Image (tube, helix red, strand yellow):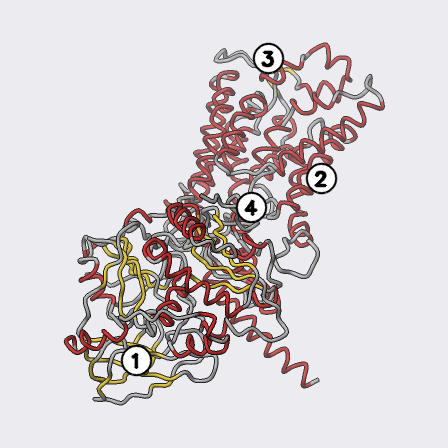
Amino acid sequence: MRKSLFKPVTFKKGGIHPLENKHLSAHKAIVELPLPDQLSINLSQHLGKKAKAIVEKKQVVCIGDVIAEADGPFSALIHAPASGTIKRIEEKLSAQGIMETTIVIEVNKEKTGIDRSKFETLNEIDLSSFSREELIKKIQQNGIVGQGGAAFPTHMKLSPPLDKQIDVLIINGAECEPYLTADHQLMLEKSMEIIKGTLVLAKILGVEHTFIGIEQNKFDAIDLFTKILNDQNITHIQVIPLITKYPQGGEKQLINAITGRDIPSGQLPFDIGVVVHNVGTAFSIYEALYYNKPVMDRVTTITGFVKNPGNFRIKIGTSFQHAIDTGAQGFLDEERVRSVINGGPMMGQSVRQLDVTVMKGTGGIVALADAEITYQDEGPCIRCSRCIDVCPINLMPLQLADDTIMNNGKLLRDALDCIECGNCSYICPTNRKLVHWIKIGKKVYRTWKVQEEKFNKNI
Amino acid sequence: MKPLILTSAPHIKSKSTLQQIMYDVALALAPVSAWSIYLFGWKSVVVIVTAIASGLVFEAAALKIQKKAQIMKTVFDGSAIVTSLLLALNMPPASPIWLTITGSFVAIIIGKHTFGGLGYNIFNPALVARVFLLISFPMQMTRWISPNGFNSEEITVATPLDVLKVSGLQKMQESFNMNDLFNGYSTGSLGEMSELLLLIGAAYLFFRKVITWEIPVSMLLGLFLFTGAFYLVDPLKYASPFFHMVTGGAILGAFFMATDMVTSPITRKGMLIFGAMTGIITGIIRILGSYPEGVSFAIIMMNAFVPLIDRYTKVIKIGSDKKR
């Protein structure tokens, strides 16, 4: 068997080792979640412009139909995850805590069962017969967005400006967020599919090197991928073991760990010739090409303080309540649940109520009980400088937070470089909400910048 | 089901807390405190207990006057205990009770709370108090007794640094040997006796990641090189740099006082500058100044430079076009 050519690598500065708690749901086979009676799909499933709804109330839709169109290139299509009738289009709170226009579908379970068969036939395709543009179009038409959490429209990431030379593609299998195991299980169950999706990505970008970065705590996935690549004699894709450390799966950190390159402040991975895609995205691309299947569901970990933590295939638009009740068989003790998180506990959003729905970027639903979540007031900064030590961008969180509190816009340029990983808040011994202040600091800086420019223009 | 808590990410937190840091420091100072009790008996106990008790009372009073919430929790967060304990370890064993209480008052009220409380003080509060007492009550603060254990007899003696300053190198070498100094059989403040036990405490703090190596190492190196240069020029007039390491508050200051998070720089580079300058100023005061000991003055002096050091030693973010 081919051994990995590299020793495990990591990014150069900062990082933390939170309690992983991945054992709760690790190695649990992906289970298809039963269809709910109703799906609520909001129009901001992705980063960029919202999609435009093209269905009306009482209209009958079939599984896989486009229900919302992309509004411009920096947007994505949304497809009906099940057959049924449009019940209403309303303003509703999303899992990210924002009021969004939401399409509510009354699901016809029988019809869905029949209609879905059209996505179950495998088309063996010859990749070389497709042109680059055709492949990107296919991805765009199937509404594929990044599944790592940010939900960046994938076709945008695959169309670099012409003057940028891309030479490295990285497939992100780090899954550094504590608790989450969806990517891990997907890599174990669908490894060949992910590799086929990766080959599509590599062809589109025309890159010389492709790396699959996987954290060492998923050694079985590292071994499996290495073995398959070896058996299939695919030499231009390499598995890179990564040291288990948060935020190893952050785009900038992953690029630095694998290629040693740094993204200059304010620029994109394109600018240093790198593109990063999540393993989940590679799998969606495989399904789009080989099964003609648009993004209608995703693999999500439901874990934490629930009876049956595990990895589930959940339709987009399924409510958290349904997912927790039918998938995870409810909470261990309802009275002790204090927080439910959309995403992982480091970067996810806590939700206000359980009727919010799963989105294309929802990698996890984590329930935290009173033992794990203790709300404490912010103490004074004791200048221990641990936040500087753990910051993967080498910022000075304590000063950025102070400048934000003092509304000192002109000193907050560095806040824009913050990747919001949350290490500073995690480590702070006096419970300062550092990353929270820095997020606000970004807005303070932008406001100051606008005023400054206006002022300079008037002179 | 209770309403869910809405908080901003991250939703999990490390176990490290202010209390843990402060009690780690207190624990690291426990061996040397015990040793001072072994050497000076009840006198040590009185100084330590008075300092901590009055320190807690002053802390509570200060918080009460400021109408802070959760007073009891803040009083016992460990920071007042560490400040008071450090003050006690900086007092001479024969200190009268009123002197210790005055010291606590200056440390907690003037050194800490007039600046805004924990995290806002510019100068190390324990050292503010020590320097205040040293200048205001020079008699009481420089009366040293020989270590007699629980024997109540008080024999006034001089510290090695006093002997060096007043009577010269030869007399000092006749009176003290290096091993005794390192192991803590001489005289001085409560906490500066056994360098060995201080280093054990410091090792614990390193292990718990409460302190980093930059400040202690650069400070001791600064002191060593500065005094070493004089020693090389005239070994008959100046004491060896090793002597300067093991006497006075060099070790206590380097590992427990200069490393105080609130009053030291926040970047690694700043810490190196801060430590080295503290060591050099200590050497200047010891060799060229009129006081025999200069650690507390040196640290206080450099505390004032911390904002300036911070300003010029900012870390450079990854991806910046500036040179690292």
Q: Chain of mark 4?
A: B
Residue ID for mark 4: B262
Q: Are marks 1 and 3 in contact (CB under 8 Å)?
A: no
Between circles 3 and 4, the one closer to the viewer is: 4
Label 1 and label 3: CA atoms lie apart by 87 Å
- Specify few, some or many for label 3: CA neighbours under 10 Å numbering under 14, 14-19, or 20 or more: few
Label 3 and label 4: CA atoms lie apart by 39 Å
Label 2 and label 1: CA atoms lie apart by 63 Å
Label 3 and label 2: CA atoms lie apart by 37 Å
Q: Chain of mark 2?
A: B
- Specify few, some or many for label 2: CA neighbours under 10 Å numbering under 14, 14-19, or 20 or more: many
Between circles 3 and 2, the one closer to the viewer is: 2
Badge 1 element: strand
Residue ID for mark 3: B155
Q: Earlier in the sequence, mark 4 or mark 2?
A: 4
Tell me which amino acid carries mark 4: Val
Residue ID for mark 1: A102
